Image (spheres, helix red, strand yellow):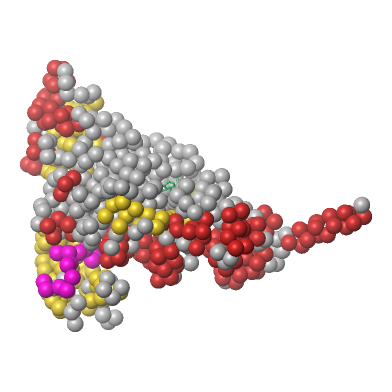
């Protein structure tokens, strides 16, 4: 009896001794992060380490109470903090990219970070930055662009914004989650040059530029190995070349074997330690197949993220930030105002002169709706503004704005015919576009027919499209004078779209992706969705406009295209260089119209004609967004990155620069080049 008592007392004393020592370095917020991590790691028992590398309760990292380590709460996602009830629903990030407004992207990230803190969330599972390779991909709306440079700028800025609020960002899905069809098993065969030049850059920017604290592996395989066990991807490239010091988590239930994941660079298996379970890891450690150093590195990365983001020093929940924050709503509105792309505006159909109008009719499945793609990024808002409501508010004092169920009956036809304008809101929504399935290129059944019917009744028919990217337009676009690409507009979207339709806001968005005439025009066509479990990225680097340009295929609307209610002209290009050798492009832009507007200027670089390897006709290497009052001229300078002229030489397994005469072009789209200048690269 006495011995048992003694043993119990000894165990109790040990446990108490192991309790958090308030004087311990790891609890000292003023101590360097690495010193704190180094002090904490050895205090964990092996069981605690083994438990930490598997998630808990679907969206948590376990706490270790005896060491005062709190649980860490996660939440999706790219369109807002969606997991814990209603939240601010921002426009789809493909729309954010359509703003070409890097500063706005950072502000957006900070807004999401504030929303996260209001809910005690420590890790946001965003941004999602995969390249838009396939127009029908169900998750394009959560992504950014077909271009790696534009994607990288936005990825980096969103990460910086989120993390400025004491919340860790998780850049996903690493890598090449470019289709939802068979996403959990598909084996993508991608050449290293295409990986390096197209599919990796946005992640590199998020990690090396934005300093993302977390990366989420994709569910697919790349060149035969699942991303969650991909040593080349996670260890060689991410942790080796890019010196990533944060943690790599799996996508949910996409880890397939403990050994591959443990040695392939996975640090945290979500939603739980199913493959990398404590028992499986213990066996692998005992057999020597996984080293203790490997396990310790995983735990160190998790502890580093927690310490660096202050999770041990303060409460993660910020009670001073409202969950339904008006500042966040304002951000959602600001983004959509800049995201909408005016694709067509014949005969100045827009803006509507509502002062002279008596009645406007609004139709279509998305007219009185909150459209947003489905899946883990879908946020249910506290409130939203539909296009109908937005127009009623924007034009309602002057013109009557009525919702019509369709254009089939005589009284509907009469109502449309007699209206001053007809707005047809079409596209997709949850269940038609979203995670888990790819969508059709064609609009959902009946929508093209509805557009044609309305256009036959009213010459001022305006089409508003909600989608994550290009849709089929061939059998209706010629019958309407105006088309707006509104993406998924977020909770304030109806207000923004109405402000653009009525002219209160001048549209400025430009396409971050090509709008092909047909699905067949895309570079991925014929190499999607793959067969026998495998898909070949045979187009290599020729994705999006790179494909259209190299094949001489004319897109319906090119990458970087968007109209305004005013017009801009360009002049006086000068190419120079900074003291540290980076090229600079200086040029002037004039607003020729009678109203203010923002112009997005795009800088493209073309390699020498006689190049050693196949090169894209032109590649985006810079951009800027310029606000100009009527008749105003401004001169701007864009500084290009040091690697502007590089390509990846597969024969050397390294980046290279070919000497020769390059062309720097300034365009208002990739197909509307305004200025060019030669540049000799030694
Ligand atoms: C899903 C998604 C991922 C999301 C996660 C948690 O599988 O692919 O983007 O963050 O699960 O919801």
In-image side of 140 versus 302 (left or right): left
Q: Where is residue 657 in the image (x, y as percent from the top left)?
A: 23, 76
- Establish if 668 lies above or below 77: below
Farthest left residue in view: 347
Say if the magenta span includes residue 621.
yes
Q: Where is residue 633 in the image (x, y as percent from the top left)?
A: 15, 63
Farthest right residue in view: 2
Question: Residue at the spot x=34%, y=45% of the render?
Answer: 182
**Nearer to us in this view, 228 or 317:** 228
Tell me if residue 371 can be seen.
no
- Establish if 436 lies above or below 303: above
**Nearer to us in this view, 114 or 231:** 231
In-image side of 663 versus 14 (left or right): left
Quarter holding the C terminus is bottom left
State which quadrant residue 30 falls in: bottom right
Question: Residue at the spot x=26%, y=56% of the render?
Answer: 537
- Establish if 354 lies above or below 113: above
State which quadrant residue 592 falls in: bottom left
Q: Disc count in the image?
A: 0
Tell me if residue 513 can be seen.
yes
Say if the magenta span includes residue 151.
no
Question: Residue at the spot x=47%, y=62% of the render?
Answer: 265
Q: Position of residue 532 (x, y in %)?
A: 31, 47
Question: Residue at the spot x=70%, y=61% of the render?
Answer: 20
State which quadrant residue 39 falls in: bottom right
Q: Where is residue 377 in the image (x, y as percent from the top left)?
A: 39, 44
Query: Magenta part of the protein: which range?
Result: 609-629
**Nearer to us in this view, 125 or 88:** 125
In-image side of 17 versus 373 (left or right): right
**Nearer to us in this view, 461 or 614:** 614
């Amino acid at each position: 009896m006495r011995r048992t008592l003694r043993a119990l007392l000894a165990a109790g004393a040990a446990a108490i001794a192991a309790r958090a020592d308030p004087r311990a370095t790891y609890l000292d917020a003023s101590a360097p992060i690495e010193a704190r991590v180094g002090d904490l790691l050895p205090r964990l028992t092996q069981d605690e380490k083994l438990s930490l590398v598997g998630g808990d309760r679907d969206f948590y990292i376990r706490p270790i109470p005896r060491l005062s380590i709190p649980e860490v709460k996660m939440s999706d996602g790219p369109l807002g903090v969606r997991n814990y009830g209603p939240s601010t629903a921002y426009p789809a990030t493909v729309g954010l990219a359509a703003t070409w407004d890097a500063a706005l992207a950072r502000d957006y990230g900070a807004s999401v970070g504030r929303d996260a803190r209001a809910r005690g969330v420590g890790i946001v599972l965003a941004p999602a930055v995969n390249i838009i390779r396939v127009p029908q991909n169900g998750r394009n709306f959560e992504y950014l662009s077909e271009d790696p440079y534009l994607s990288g700028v936005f990825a980096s800025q969103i990460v910086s914004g989120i993390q400025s609020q004491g919340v860790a960002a998780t850049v996903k899905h690493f890598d090449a989650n470019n289709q939802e069809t068979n996403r959990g098993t598909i084996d993508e065969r991608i050449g290293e040059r295409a990986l390096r030049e197209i599919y990796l850059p946005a992640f590199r920017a998020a990690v090396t530029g934005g300093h993302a604290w977390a990366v989420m592996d994709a569910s697919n395989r790349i060149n035969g190995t699942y991303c969650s066990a991909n040593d080349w991807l996670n260890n060689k490239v991410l942790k080796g070349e890019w010196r990533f010091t944060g943690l790599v988590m799996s996508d949910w239930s996409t880890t397939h074997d403990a050994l591959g994941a443990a040695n392939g660079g996975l640090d945290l298996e979500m939603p739980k330690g199913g493959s990398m379970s404590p028992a499986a890891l213990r066996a692998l450690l005992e057999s020597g197949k996984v080293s203790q150093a490997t396990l310790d590195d995983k735990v160190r990365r998790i502890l580093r993220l927690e310490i660096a983001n202050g999770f041990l020093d303060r409460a993660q929940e910020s009670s001073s930030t409202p969950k339904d924050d008006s500042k966040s709503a304002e951000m959602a509105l600001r983004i959509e105002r800049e995201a909408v792309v005016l694709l067509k505006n014949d005969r100045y159909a827009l803006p509507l002169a509502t002062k002279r109008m008596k009645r406007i009719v609004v139709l279509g499945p998305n007219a009185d709706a909150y459209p947003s793609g489905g899946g883990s990024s879908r946020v249910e808002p506290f409130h939203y503004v539909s296009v109908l409501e937005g127009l009623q508010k924007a034009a309602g004092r002057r013109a009557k704005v009525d919702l019509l169920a369709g254009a089939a009956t005589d009284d509907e036809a009469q109502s449309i015919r007699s209206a001053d304008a007809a707005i047809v809101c079409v596209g997709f929504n949850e269940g038609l576009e979203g995670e888990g399935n790819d969508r059709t290129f064609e609009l959902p059944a009946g929508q093209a027919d509805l557009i044609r019917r309305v256009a036959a009744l009213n010459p001022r028919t305006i089409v508003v499209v909600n989608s994550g990217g290009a849709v089929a337009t061939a059998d209706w676009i010629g019958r309407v004078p105006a088309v707006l690409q509104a993406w998924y507009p977020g909770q304030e979207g109806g207000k923004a779209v109405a402000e653009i339709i009525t002219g209160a806001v001048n549209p400025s968005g430009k396409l971050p992706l090509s709008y092909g005439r047909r699905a067949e025009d895309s570079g991925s066509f014929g190499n999607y969705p793959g067969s026998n479990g495998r898909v070949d990225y045979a187009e290599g680097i020729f994705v999006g406009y790179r494909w259209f340009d190299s094949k001489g295929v004319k897109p319906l609307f090119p990458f970087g295209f968007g109209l305004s209610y005013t017009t801009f002209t360009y002049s006086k290009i000068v190419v120079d260089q900074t003291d540290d050798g980076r090229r600079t492009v200086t040029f002037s832009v004039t607003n020729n119209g009678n109203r203010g507007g923002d112009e997005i200027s795009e800088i493209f670089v073309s390699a020498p004609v006689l190049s050693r390897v196949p090169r894209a006709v032109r590649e985006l290497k810079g951009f800027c967004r310029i606000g100009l009052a009527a008749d105003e001229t401004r001169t701007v300078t864009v500084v290009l990155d040091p690697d502007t002229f590089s390509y990846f030489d597969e024969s050397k397994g390294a980046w290279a620069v070919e000497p020769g005469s390059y062309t720097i072009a300034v365009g208002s789209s990739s197909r509307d080049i305004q200025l060019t200048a030669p540049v000799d690269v030694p």
